[in-house]
Structure formats: structure tokens, C-alpha cells
Image (cartoon, rainbow, N blue to C red):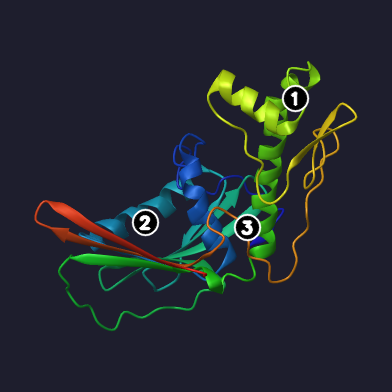
Amino acid sequence: MALGSGDIWGALNSEMLRMEGFQSFLPFLLSLMTQPTTVLIELAEPAHVKDFLNDAVLRRSNGGQQGEFHRLQDKEAWVYSLNVLDMFQLHLRVEIKSGYLLISNLPWSKQLDITDIVEMDLNGAQLQLNLNEITQQLPALHTKVFTDYRTAAVDGMGYLYPFLATGVADTIPEAIAKHFAVFGFKPVHPHTGQWEWRDDELQSTEFGTALRPVQPEFHKGQKDFGVFPTLQTIRINTQLEDSGMRARIRWVTVD
């Protein structure tokens, strides 16, 4: 990944990467920019795809457009440079092998060889998440989750403050009960903290006040946060049956 590139939108044409709908490609692009990745796409007509890619090289060179797309000499492979918001430059190797289109990021991905193709009936799929294996991302996840917690705590203050400031309620539990009677739902303080009413000011024991917000820092090994803090693994199985799909979800939690 190159930072500070001078190129702007190294695309095949000016229509492909307009911002409308571009957000849906961001997770794919971020994966390609941050880890070795190769995407394999089975082609119904490899010759047509090859002609299209060769034509794309010619069209970009004749059109004088910005960006870079060229063919590797003596190979059915091309290099495509994509500039994202003039900050990140992503180099992709596009290659046709054994009827498949291979898209890989440079320079991390190794060159793949397709040695065998086995036809399989489409029947079932399984997705398994081992949440205990997440370690490197925990500090970032903690920051994101507790930022949401803090937002929820401040929102709760907004619900309760009018009842306390006007004297309709004298305590936090009374304000929550009054709010439920008027609006039909109860504000709930996130995580382990609670709201306190002191000196005509509403605050959270964990997240401070609306004007002076604070947030707990991450401690190594901490996992007791998020929507399912006790969840260890989750497995989703799907199988096509007649005209429908059967799905089964299993999960394991900490006692």
C-alpha cells in the first residue's frame, strides 16, 4: 500500500468508481490493502474476458485517463493500480488461469497455481467464528464498543435530565419510572456503571458527563464487553433442501 500517491482513480473508465454505491466495495478494498488476498472467479468465457482486459489497456492508453493498467509481458496477466481518495494506492494483479480470473494484491500475495479442479454439488455451507482467537483486535474493539456505551449513557442522561431538573423526580430510579410512564420505555445504563444526580448535575460513574466525557481504557486480556461478552464460538450451517434452505445456529458461551 502506497501513501500519498499522485494518481486519482486509476480506474478502467470514469464511470466505474463514482461514489454512488462505492461504499459497498470498501470492505473488499480494505481486505486487499491490509493482508495477502487472492480472489478466484470462475469464468464462463475466459476468451471474452481476456479480450476485454486487453481492450481496457488500449482504451486507457488512448484515452489519456489518469491511473495505470498494463499487461505483463508474455503472460495473460495485468497490473491494475487503484488510487483511493488520493491517499492509498492499491496494486492488483489480474490473471487468467485454468478458466479462472485471479485477483491478488501486490506485493504480499504469492503466485497461485491451479493444479486440480473438482466439480462438487452445491449443498451446504458452514461458517464458524472462534471469538477466543481474537486478540490483536481487542484494543480497537474495546474502543469502539465503549464509545457506543458512552454515547448510550449520554443519550440516557438526555432522557432523564428534564425530570430531575424540573423536580418531577428526586432520584434516578424515580426519573426512570416517570420516563417509562410518559414514553413507554426505560433508559438503561450500559455496561457496569450507573447514573448519579449530584449538585444539580447528571453524570455517569463510568463515562462522566455530557460536557466532560471520560471512557475506561483497555486492559490486556479484557473480554467482558460487547453484545455477547460470554460468547466463545458460533457456528452457522446451511443446507439447500428442495425449494428452501435449512439453517442451524449453534453457540458456546462461558459459564
- Rendered-image quadrant of the N terminus: bottom right
Q: In this rendering, does residue 11 appear at all?
A: no
**Where does residue 249 sit, x and y in percent of width and height?**
33, 61
Which three-letter amino acid code belongs to the residue tagged 2? Leu
Residue 171: give its label. Answer: none
Q: How far apart are the two marked residues, 2 and 1, measured between alpha carbons?
A: 62 Å
Q: Earlier in the sequence, mark 3 or mark 1?
A: 1
Q: Give the labeled residue for mark 1.
A: 161
Q: Residue furthest left?
A: 242
Disc 1 secondary structure class: helix
Q: In this rendering, does residue 4 appear at all?
A: yes
Q: Give the labeled residue for mark 2.
A: 53
Left or right of residue 94: residue 215 = right
Q: Give the labeled residue for mark 3.
A: 225
Could you say which quadrant of the image residue 199 lies in? top right
Left or right of residue 161: residue 18 = left
Q: In this picture, is 189 found above or below 94?
A: above
Disc 3 secondary structure class: loop
Disc 2 secondary structure class: helix
The nearer-to-camera label among 3 and 2 is 3
Q: Residue at x 67, y 26 (%)?
A: 159
Q: Earlier in the sequence, mark 2 or mark 1?
A: 2
**Where does residue 116 sit, x and y in percent of width and height?**
25, 82
Which three-letter amino acid code belongs to the residue tagged 1? Tyr
